[in-house]
Amino acid sequence: MSSAPVRVRFAPSPTGPLHMGGVRTALYNYLFAKKHKGTFLIRIEDTDQTRFVPGAQQYIMDALQWCGIMPTEGPGIGGEFGPYVQSERKEMYKPFAELLINEDKAYYAFDTAKDLDRMREQAKTMGMPNWQYNSVTRNSMRNSLTLPQSEVSQLLQSGAPYVIRMKMPRNHDVRFHDIIRGWVVVNTNNLDDKVLFKSDGMPTYHLANIVDDHTMQISHVIRGEEWLPSAPLHIMLYEAFGWPCPEFAHLPLLLRPDGNGKLSKRDGDRLGFPVFPTNWTTAEGELYSGYRENGYLPGAFINMLAFLGWNPGTEQEIFSIEELVEAFSLERVSKAGAKFDPNKTKWFQQSYLRAQSNKEIANQLRQIENIALSDQELHTVCNLMKERATFAKDILVEGAYLFDRPSMYDSETILKKWKTETSSHMMEWKSVLDSLSDFSAQTIEHAFKSFLESKGLAIGAVLLPYRLVLTGVGAGPGMFDISAFLGKQEVLERIEAGLKKVEQIINEA
């Protein structure tokens, strides 16, 4: 790697919400910049005004904010290389395109859409379905290479529509080294003369991208694999301008869970999981769900994304953002597509939730629902339930009996496990509980063991029925901890109410 300062950019187009693949690209840029004490900036590439979606740019910035990977330069942030929105840099691109024309490395093309369609149709009839505007076909088109100079000047002066195309040399090998993929070689005979400047006065992605990367002093271009076919053109543009080339790294595709094809924006809710960091609502009112609103912690989402294509080379899977920065390297990014696993994503979320303090989880719960418990009581609930939860909201559902007395009871388990003598055992156990002056979990557990021993009972003869009458469900955290949390009076009253409900269920069966 060169000794020049590391400057990387995330350059999304505001054509809709930010797909998780885009977030991963931003993340890898962020990690690389932090690792090398460099700069991570964001540039909005809105040269294609026909696909601009209102609100998309703000969505991108808000999503990066939630993920905790904000750039230090960009729109609304500032920086000495702005503006960071391409449409606001519009005036600077045309001189660069004209410079290429003056050096015979680009040319004006006056072909209309009908002209191009006609050529494609003619090519099809001749058995050439993939017609391109290239070093061969340009000789039969209406451009400044085939028209007299006087006619070209007249067309330009009259305001005739035109585009500026790259003059791709014939039979030239373009070679560049990709940090992830190694050496890439492409012959220019396989490349067309891409449009660099459009008739609407805007540059295409290709020209604007190169000019901006150069003028913003970008040292490394870390982007998705879908841009790999464009890399040879970009290399040629750097050479045409006589500029040094940044280093390239093209990231692997994100694949669907079955590995069959690229994970797309349309796969999200259709397959039962989000593909966007946060909720996105279209202009038509259609909602696409996000990880944030589904209850995922940003750290878990980022940890999961980091592993989609990168491997630290160790057994460690749970990383803080600081640990990711320390461990990350582009050399350990795979060339092969990364298959997304929604179950593994939930595992990351569960791991992150368990690592949170009870206070942090309690704060999340209060944002979800108005809870009457005191802070200390809610912290205890979180401590009891977080090992069994994937999302904070699960505690409200799976641990509902810790907030209110159960109204529903697991009738299937009751009918299967309740014996003739079970109710009398429960009444005797209730008397033992009533006699306790200290209602701590430790004291209740000691009393329970003594009760079983004195009656010669197996643990299952009492513990499961006790759980059922107290909570209404057949599984959960330790019953002695639950009992201590609920308190003596509440436990005694729940046993009474639960036994009545059990009797009703058995009589109605």
Image (spheres, helix red, strand yellow):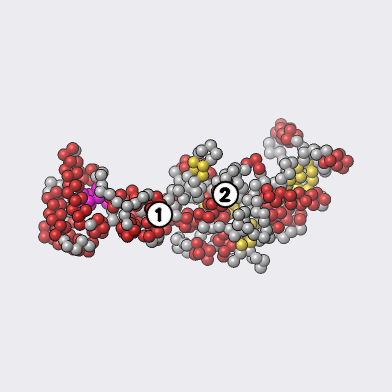
Residue 484 at least partly seen: yes
Q: Is residue 471 magenta?
A: yes
- The answer to which of 10 and 54 lies nearer the viewer is 54
Considering the image in quadrants, where does the N terminus appear?
bottom right
Tell me if residue 394 comes above or below residue 507 in the rendering.
below
Quadrant of residue 178 within the rendered picture: bottom right
Residue for point 70% across, 51% down: 89
Q: Is residue 59 magenta?
A: no
Considering the image in quadrants, where does the C terminus appear?
top left
Is residue 143 toward the left or the right of residue 459 in the image?
Answer: right
Magenta-tinted stretch: 465-475
Residue for point 72% across, 60% down: 244
Tell me if residue 114 comes above or below residue 379 in the rendering.
above
The residue under label 1 is 364
Quadrant of residue 128 within the rendered picture: top right
Across and down, in percent, residue 243 comes to 74, 59
Q: Secondary structure at mark 1?
A: helix
Which mark, by number, is residue 58? 2
Q: Secondary structure at mark 2?
A: helix
Label 1 CA crowd tier, 10 Å (few <14, some 14–19, many 20+): some
Residue for point 18% across, 53% down: 492
Quadrant of residue 83 within the rendered picture: bottom right
Is residue 98 toward the left or the right of residue 324 in the image?
Answer: right
Q: Amino acid at mark 1?
A: Gln
